[in-house]
C-alpha cells in the first residue's frame, strides 16, 4: 500500500501523534467515500486502503496516491502521514507551527527537505492543533492579499499530499525562499488545495472561498475569524457555531476587545487558557440538554450582555443609567417572554444560581454532569487570571445585578451596582507581558486607549498604572508611557522612578 | 554574527542588543522566559524577532537552543510560510520580552528505527535543562522582498539580520 498512517506504538509521542485525526482527514479528502479504510497496524504504521467510488478531483488524487506503487519508493510505503500537535519539531528544530505542515522527500533523494527525513518514504507531517488553536490566516483569493482565510485541517493535509504527489514522481517544482509571490511548487499546491476547499464547502453546504495561489505567506489569526475554532462553549450551548450568540461574542472580541496590542495579547493568553479546559467541558455538555441550557442562559448570554454593556459605555459613552435601563429590560420578568431570551424571572434566577455554582460561586445542589463541569472549571479555568477577569467577573457581575433587581432594588440599585463594576473592573485587567516589549509610542498609545475605554475613573487609571509599574516597570517604554500619561497628583509618572526613561 | 551577551558588542566596535534573563516561570504545560533586552546603542532602535522559530536539542549536551531567528533554515515545502513577528527596542532602552515554550517537545528522531521507520521522541524541558536563547536583530525594520528569485536560498528575512544575541539560561533558574 502506498499511504500509511504513522501511529505512536511506543507512546513516545504522548498524545502528540494523532493517527485517528489523520484517518478522519483522509476520509474527508475521499469525500466520505465508503471505499476508504485503514488496514491492520504493522509496526508503527497503519496502511490506508481505498476502493474509490467517488469521481471528484480529491478522491481521484487520493486513489492515485494509495493504489500506485511509485518508482521512487518501490515496495513502499510511498507516503507516510504523521499528524502531530503544536509541540512537535522537525529534526532541525523547526516548530511545526511555523509551516502548518510539510512534505519531506525520502532521505537521500536530494530534494529540498530530504535531509530532514530519516525514512525511505515521503513523509507528510501536519499540525493538528491549528496553530495552538489560534489558526493560520492565509491570503484570500481576489482580495489583493487580505489574510483572513483559515486553513482547515483536511485542507492542510491535502496541500501536503499535493507536494507528496509530485515528490513520488520526482517532479517537485522550483521551491524558493519567497512567499509572495509563491514559488512554483507552492503555487501548484495551493491550486490543488483549492480543489479540497471546494469539496469541503460542498460537504458543509457553505459558499466556496479560495486561497490566492500567488501568495504563500500567512500569519497567525490569534484565535479569531473562524466559526469552527471560536467560542466552543458558546457554540455547543447555543447549538451552532453560527448562532447569534457566537456571532455576538466574535463581534465583541474582534471589533472591540482585540483591536489594541494589549487586547490582542490578552486574548492570546485567554485562548491558551480557554483551550486548556473548554474541550473537556463541551464533551460533558454535548449529551446533556439541561446543562447546555444552564450554560447558555446562565453564563454565555450574561457574558454577552455584560461585554456589550462595557462596549457601549467605553466606545459610545452611553451613561450608566441608560445601560442599567437596557439591562433591566432584559431582566424584566413581567414582559411575558421573561426577558428577551426566553427565561422567566424565577427561572432566570434559578439558572443564575446554578450557573454561579458551576463557577464555584454558589452552593446549590448540582447533577453529576454539572458537578463534572464545575470541577473542571474550578481546577483548570478559574485559577487563570485571564479567564477569571475576562469571563467569570462579568458573568458574576451580571448575576449580582439580577439579584439586585429581583430583590426590588429597582433601577437605582442596578445602576449603582453597574457603576461600581464599570469603575473597578478595567483596573484589574491582567498585565500582558506584551507591554514589556512595546515601543515607547505604542505603550503610550495603549495607555491612552485604555484611559478612554476601560479606565474611565482616576482611581482605575492609578490602580492599573501601579500594577503595570510593579510588573513591568523595568521596561523603559512602560515607565515613559506611565510618566507621560499620569496625573502628577497620583504620585506616579513624573514622580515615579524613571531612571533612564527620560529622553 | 553572535555578540557579547554582556555588552551587546556585535563586532566592528558597535554596541548592540544585550540579553539577560529577567525571570523564568513554569506553568502547566509551559515554560515562560522573561528576557531583558537592553539596546546599548544611543542612536538607533534595534528590531528583533520576537517569536521562537525553532527549538534545537543538542543530543551531545542535552541543551536546548531556542532560536528566535531563521538563519540557516532551508526552505521546505509547507502549507503556509508563517513570517515571524518582530518588535523593537528604542535607543538606550530596555524591553522585556516573554517567550513561551512547551514544557515537553516531541521531535522526529534523527535516527531511524531498526527497520528504517520513523521514530518520534519526547524531550522534556525539565528543571535540569540548559536552555540557550538566540535572538536575531537588526537596526533596520524588516521589509519583505517582493522580487521573484531563483534557487533555494534560506528564509527571506534571514538576510535582514545583522547580528544575534545569545543567552544561556542555567538549570533550575525557574521560579514556580
Image (cartoon, grey):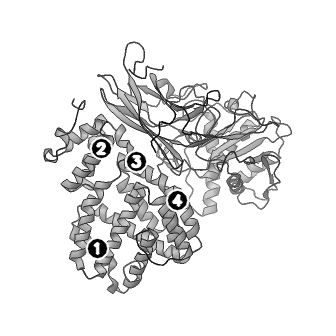
Residue at image location 41% in from the left, 72% down from the top? A356
Residue at image location 73% in from the left, 39% down from the top? B119
User: Height in image: B6 above or below A446?
Assistant: above
Q: Would you name the residue on which mark 2 appears? A: A470
Mark found first going from the N terminus, 2 or 3: 3
Q: Which of A226 and A140 is in front in this view?
A: A226
Mark found first going from the N terminus, 3 or 1: 3
Q: Which of A491 and A131 is in front in this view?
A: A491
- Callout 3 crowding tier (Cα within 10 Å): few <14, some 14–19, many ≥20: some
Residue A345 x %, y %: 37, 83
Q: Would you name the residue on which mark 3 appears? A: A265
Tell me, yes or no, if residue B48 can be seen here.
yes
Q: Mark 3 lies on which chain?
A: A
Same chain for labels 4 and 1? Say yes or no: yes
Mark found first going from the N terminus, 3 or 4: 3
Residue B85 x %, y %: 45, 37
> Of helix, strand and loop, which one carries label 4?
helix
Mark found first going from the N terminus, 4 or 2: 4
Q: Would you name the residue on which mark 4 appears? A: A277
Amino acid at each position: 500500500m502506498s499511504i500509511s498512517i504513522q501511529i505512536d506504538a511506543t507512546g513516545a509521542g504522548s498524545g502528540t501523534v494523532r493517527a485517528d485525526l489523520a484517518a478522519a482527514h483522509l476520509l474527508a479528502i475521499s469525500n466520505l467515500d465508503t471505499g476508504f479504510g485503514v488496514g491492520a497496524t504493522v509496526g508503527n504504521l497503519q496502511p490506508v486502503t481505498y476502493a474509490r467510488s467517488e469521481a471528484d478531483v480529491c478522491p481521484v488524487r487520493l486513489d492515485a496516491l494509495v493504489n500506485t506503487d511509485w518508482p521512487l519508493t518501490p515496495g513502499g510505503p510511498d507516503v507516510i502521514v504523521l499528524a502531530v500537535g503544536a509541540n512537535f519539531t522537525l529534526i532541525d528544530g523547526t516548530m511545526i507551527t511555523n509551516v502548518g505542515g510539510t512534505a519531506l522527500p525520502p532521505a537521500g533523494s536530494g530534494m529540498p527537505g530530504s535531509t530532514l527525513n530519516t525514512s525511505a518514504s515521503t513523509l507528510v507531517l501536519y499540525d493538528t492543533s491549528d496553530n495552538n488553536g489560534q489558526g493560520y490566516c492565509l491570503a484570500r483569493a481576489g482580495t489583493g492579499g487580505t489574510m483572513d482565510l483559515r486553513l482547515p485541517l483536511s485542507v492542510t493535509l491535502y496541500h501536503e499530499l499535493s507536494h507528496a504527489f509530485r515528490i513520488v514522481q520526482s517532479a517537485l517544482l522550483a521551491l524558493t525562499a519567497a512567499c509572495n509571490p509563491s514559488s512554483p511548487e507552492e503555487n501548484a499546491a495551493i491550486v490543488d488545495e483549492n480543489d479540497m476547499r471546494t469539496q469541503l464547502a460542498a460537504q458543509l453546504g457553505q459558499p466556496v472561498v479560495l486561497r490566492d495561489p500567488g501568495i504563500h505567506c500567512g500569519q497567525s489569526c490569534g484565535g479569531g475569524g473562524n466559526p469552527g475554532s471560536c467560542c466552543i462553549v458558546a457554540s455547543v450551548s447555543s447549538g451552532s457555531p453560527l448562532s447569534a450568540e457566537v456571532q455576538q461574542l466574535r463581534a465583541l472580541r474582534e471589533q472591540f476587545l482585540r483591536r489594541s496590542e494589549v487586547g490582542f495579547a490578552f486574548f492570546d493568553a485567554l485562548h491558551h487558557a480557554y483551550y486548556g479546559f473548554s474541550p473537556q467541558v463541551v464533551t460533558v455538555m454535548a449529551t446533556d440538554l439541561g446543562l447546555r441550557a444552564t450554560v447558555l442562559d446562565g453564563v454565555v448570554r450574561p457574558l454577552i450582555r455584560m461585554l456589550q454593556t462595557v462596549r457601549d459605555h467605553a466606545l459610545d459613552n452611553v451613561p450608566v443609567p441608560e445601560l442599567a435601563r437596557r439591562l433591566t429590560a432584559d431582566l424584566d420578568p413581567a414582559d411575558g417572554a421573561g426577558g428577551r431570551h426566553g427565561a422567566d424571572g424565577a427561572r432566570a434566577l434559578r439558572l443564575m444560581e446554578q450557573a454561579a455554582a458551576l463557577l464555584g460561586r454558589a452552593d446549590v445542589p448540582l447533577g453529576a454532569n454539572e458537578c463534572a463541569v464545575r470541577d473542571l472549571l474550578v481546577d483548570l479555568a478559574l485559577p487563570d487570571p485571564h479567564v477569571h477577569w475576562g469571563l467569570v467577573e462579568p458573568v458574576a457581575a451580571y448575576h449580582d445585578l439580577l439579584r439586585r433587581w429581583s430583590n426590588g432594588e429597582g433601577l437605582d440599585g442596578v445602576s449603582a451596582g453597574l457603576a461600581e463594576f464599570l469603575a473597578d473592573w478595567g483596573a484589574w485587567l491582567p498585565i500582558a507581558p506584551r507591554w514589556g516589549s512595546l515601543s515607547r509610542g505604542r505603550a503610550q498609545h495603549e495607555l491612552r486607549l485604555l484611559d478612554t475605554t476601560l479606565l474611565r475613573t482616576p482611581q482605575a487609571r492609578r490602580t492599573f498604572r501601579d500594577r503595570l509599574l510593579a510588573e513591568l516597570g523595568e521596561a523603559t517604554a512602560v515607565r515613559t508611557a506611565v510618566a507621560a500619561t499620569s496625573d502628577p497628583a497620583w504620585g506616579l509618572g513624573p514622580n515615579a522612578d524613571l531612571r533612564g526613561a527620560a529622553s | 554574527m553572535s555578540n557579547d551577551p554582556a555588552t551587546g558588542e556585535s563586532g566592528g566596535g558597535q554596541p548592540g542588543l544585550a540579553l539577560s534573563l529577567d525571570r523564568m516561570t513554569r506553568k502547566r504545560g509551559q515554560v515562560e522566559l522573561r528576557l531583558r533586552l537592553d539596546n546599548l546603542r544611543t542612536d538607533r532602535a534595534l528590531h528583533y524577532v520576537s517569536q521562537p522559530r525553532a527549538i534545537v536539542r543538542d543530543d551531545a549536551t542535552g541543551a536546548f537552543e531556542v532560536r528566535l531567528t531563521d538563519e540557516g533554515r532551508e526552505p521546505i515545502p509547507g502549507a503556509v510560510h508563517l513570517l515571524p513577528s518582530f518588535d523593537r527596542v528604542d535607543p538606550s532602552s530596555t524591553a522585556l520580552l516573554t517567550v513561551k515554550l512547551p514544557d515537553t517537545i516531541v521531535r522526529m528522531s534523527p535516527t531511524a528505527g531498526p527497520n528504517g521507520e520513523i521514530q518520534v521522541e519526547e524531550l522534556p524541558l525539565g528543571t535540569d535543562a540548559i536552555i540557550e536563547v538566540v535572538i536575531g536583530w537588526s537596526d533596520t525594520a524588516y521589509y519583505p522582498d517582493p522580487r521573484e528569485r531563483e534557487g533555494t536560498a534560506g528564509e527571506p528575512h534571514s538576510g535582514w539580520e545583522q547580528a544575534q544575541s545569545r543567552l544561556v539560561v542555567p538549570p533550575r533558574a525557574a521560579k514556580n
